[in-house]
Amino acid sequence: MRLSPWFTACLVFAGVLSARVTAESQPATRPAPDLRAERTWLLRQFDQRAASRVAEALSQPADNTAGGIAWGHSYLMSALAEMLHATGDSRYAALFVRLGTWVADGRDDRHQRRDEVRGKVLPAWGSSKYSDGKWYVWAVHTGMIAAPMARFGAAVNEHPRLRERFKADAGRFTAIAREALGAHADQFRPGPADGEGHLYGYWLKRGLPLNQQNAPARAWIWLADVAGDRAVLDEPTHLATFLKNRLRLTEDGAYVWGYWPPLDGPGEAFEDISHAAINADFIVLCAENGIVFGQQDVDRVAKTFLTRVMPEPNKVANDLAGRGVAKYPYAPFMWGRLARHDTAVRDRLLEYAHTRIDDKSAPNTFLVGLVHLVAATR
């Protein structure tokens, strides 16, 4: 049957219209990143900030009274140690030595500052902000500060050229970290379930929130790396088991958890994304070192990030339920270790980094994110 010209024209128009509607209904796809170009850009952005941040810190006394070292300068140390691992560039080692020496000089035992709860001077960094004005050494502060020191030691050991020049510094910072963590050895408690362990807080008079015990656990992992002795991993293994038993698996395959779950189970709460980043990083670090967690757990944490922490490229939630607007918009960068294992996380953080790059007052957590992305674009 021969179609009339008018009918043929209608069919052609309908086909064009259908194709146009279909195309417009599809979400725009961001081109795959040029990883070599992105890595160069990330390194440049990091280098434009790192040295000046170190100089700014050294221009004032090392003081953790309000937690400034633990929640500020420790991230800069972490960024430098991770960048040293990622590049082997001695410039980052030199910067770390300057900053780490400054931080070490602020330790309580070097100023005879007495922990008012324990009744003695500890080789760690006390604070009075979170303990009603009393001077107290928090395990989480020690963990946040000691972990990058131990990480520096591990990074130096990885590179023969660095060992020649920074072996003594690596040994010094490793010893400082080990001594500081030793001040909390009496806080470890086995259980409550078989294979579990948790840290008891003398100020809080109960078991610590997850992030407060997993921060020092990360430092123990790096110390084990330096020592080449997996026996050091006994406590972080028990803490990792405790954490895993308090994770909840959602219907869509993501992990969620509370800030301070009860000792007898996971509870029903949702942690904020900032504190949760410490736990997420611990999970990934454990998986990388064959401790309790594996690739499936990393995939589930990646799902958490992509569907709840940062469900859209420029949308950052406040908690692991995906609710609200983030109090700390740079917190997603603290989840950056995931980017080494999940390309979707990597690409989302890369895109987010480009939107934040003009903020010259961005916290040191931003630098941690840049470093993890450098490692993820190798």
Image (cartoon, rainbow, N blue to C red):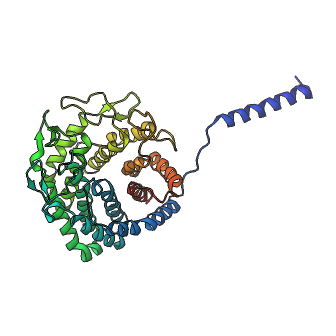
In front of the other: 117 or 183:
117
Q: Is residue 73 left or right of residue 176?
A: right
Q: The N terminus lies in which quarter of the figure?
A: top right
Q: Is residue 326 left or right of residue 20?
A: left
Q: Residue at x 46, y 41 (%)?
A: 316
Q: How many marks?
A: 0
Whether 58 is drawn above or below 242: the answer is below
Q: Residue at x 24, y 46 (%)?
A: 130
Q: The C terminus lies in which quarter of the figure?
A: bottom left
Give the x, y percent position of residue 118: 9, 49
As drawn, the residue found furthest toward the bottom would be 165
Give the x, y percent position of residue 209: 23, 39
Q: Can residue 356 be seen in this snapshot?
A: yes
Whether 88 is drawn above or below 35: the answer is below
In front of the other: 204 or 155:
204
Give the x, y percent position of residue 59: 33, 69
Whether 211 is drawn above or below 174: the answer is above
Q: Is residue 228 left or right of residue 260?
A: left
Q: Which quarter of the figure has residue 269?
A: top left
Give the x, y percent position of residue 71: 31, 53
Q: Can residue 228 be seen in this snapshot?
A: no
As drawn, the residue found furthest toward the right would be 5
As drawn, the residue found furthest toward the front would be 133
